[in-house]
């Protein structure tokens, strides 16, 4: 039984999940925040397309959903490639008939482009370009594909993964910060543009979350960074997923163009 269902005697459902009947597309679905969100979406009644460059990981996520009684497919995608993004959207529509909600979450960290712990003038041009290509252009390409299909079916909800780095500067993370500030700006603009089309666009801004992406920086600066977080701990991927789920649900129907911190108080301090 999925956690989003409550059953009375005889097995009759008496309450549907927040995303019951919706078709959802999630990039970066192979692990971390993407996987946690895919699992929660399924618990709340959505049919889920988990997409990732790591197809094996995406297939594991989809299998976990199916084993729990949900419906899911796995897709391979390089989000910086327009053709692959279009194919991903087409495959989701082919499987589920539509895209009701999308979580554009695929991204990389400075360590993935060989620029961890480097100040701005030491970043390589190749690493900077790759960061923008994946973390900013990739979100834009996904939004283009998703919005086009949502316009055809009467609306939907999109959530982009920005970051506290999309709201403030972070030393030794210039390319990442530039990309995430771009995501925050894209989100606000699209939220305005499509408000009358019944398409809501919002962003979640995670703080320091316990995932593979943060392992390297935490190994170097963990104590220093946690001293900056009022909650004095890292967040869990599921805590980001809860915000994304609400933003994709009808319960947030008057929310668009917004960025939501889930950061243990980091931005408030």
Image (tube, rainbow, N blue to C red):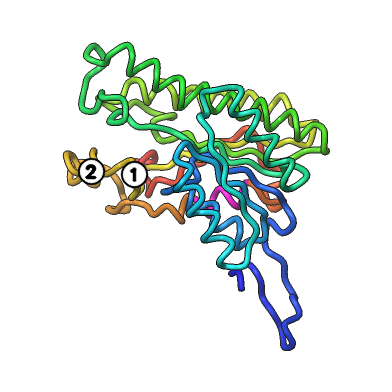
Mark before the other along the chain sequence, 2 or 1? 1
Residue shown at 44% from the left, 23% from the top: 179
Residue shown at 26% from the left, 42% from the top: 228
Q: CA distance from mark 2 to mark 1?
A: 9 Å
Q: Is 165 left or right of 5, judged from the image as shown?
A: left
Identify the residue under disc 2: 218
- The boundaries of the magenta stretch are 241-247
Q: Residue 26, how many percent across, how many down?
A: 57, 43
Residue shown at 30% from the left, 28% from the top: 110
Q: Quadrant of residue 91?
A: top right
Q: Main secondary structure of the magenta part?
A: helix
Q: Any magenta on residue 246?
A: yes
Q: Residue 191, how many percent across, how many down?
A: 66, 30
> Closest to the observer: 256 or 60?
60
Residue 179 - label: none
Which secondary structure lies at badge 2?
helix
State whether residue 188 is above or below residue 155: above
**Pointer 2 and pointer 1: residues touching (CB < 8 Å)?**
yes
Which secondary structure lies at badge 1?
loop
Crowd class of label 1 (few under 14; some 14 to 19; many from 20; radius 10 Å): many
Q: Is 218 left or right of 101, judged from the image as shown?
A: left
Q: Is 176 left or right of 33, judged from the image as shown?
A: left
Q: How many marks?
A: 2
Q: Residue furthest front?
A: 56
Identify the residue under disc 1: 208
Crowd class of label 2 (few under 14; some 14 to 19; many from 20; radius 10 Å): some
| Quadrant of the rendering where the C terminus is positioned | top left
Residue shown at 67% from the left, 60% from the top: 45
Q: Residue 24, how many percent across, how many down?
A: 65, 47
């Amino acid at each position: 039984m999925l956690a989003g269902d409550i059953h009375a005697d005889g097995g009759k459902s008496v309450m549907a999940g927040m995303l019951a009947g919706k078709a959802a597309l999630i990039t970066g679905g192979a692990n971390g925040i993407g996987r946690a969100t895919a699992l929660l979406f399924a618990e709340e009644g959505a049919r889920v397309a988990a997409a990732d460059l790591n197809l094996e990981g995406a297939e594991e996520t989809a299998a976990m959903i199916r084993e729990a009684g949900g419906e899911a497919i796995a897709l391979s995608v390089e989000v910086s490639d327009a053709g692959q993004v279009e194919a991903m959207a087409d495959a989701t529509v082919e499987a589920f008939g539509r895209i009701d909600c999308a979580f554009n979450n695929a991204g990389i960290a400075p360590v993935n482009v060989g620029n961890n712990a480097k100040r701005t003038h030491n970043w390589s041009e190749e690493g900077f370009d790759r960061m923008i290509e994946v973390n900013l252009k990739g979100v834009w390409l996904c939004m283009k594909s998703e919005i086009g299909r949502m316009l055809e079916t009467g609306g939907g909800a999109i959530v982009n993964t920005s970051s506290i780095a999309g709201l403030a500067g972070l030393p030794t993370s210039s390319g990442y910060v530039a990309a995430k500030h771009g995501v925050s700006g894209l989100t606000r603009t699209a939220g305005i543009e499509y408000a009358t089309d019944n398409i809501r666009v919002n962003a979640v801004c995670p703080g320091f979350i316990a995932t593979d992406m943060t392992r390297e920086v935490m190994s170097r600066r963990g104590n220093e960074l946690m001293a900056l977080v009022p909650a004095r701990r890292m967040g869990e991927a599921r805590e980001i997923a809860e915000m994304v789920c609400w933003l994709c649900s009808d319960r947030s129907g008057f929310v668009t163009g917004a960025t939501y911190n889930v950061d243990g108080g980091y931005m408030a301090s």
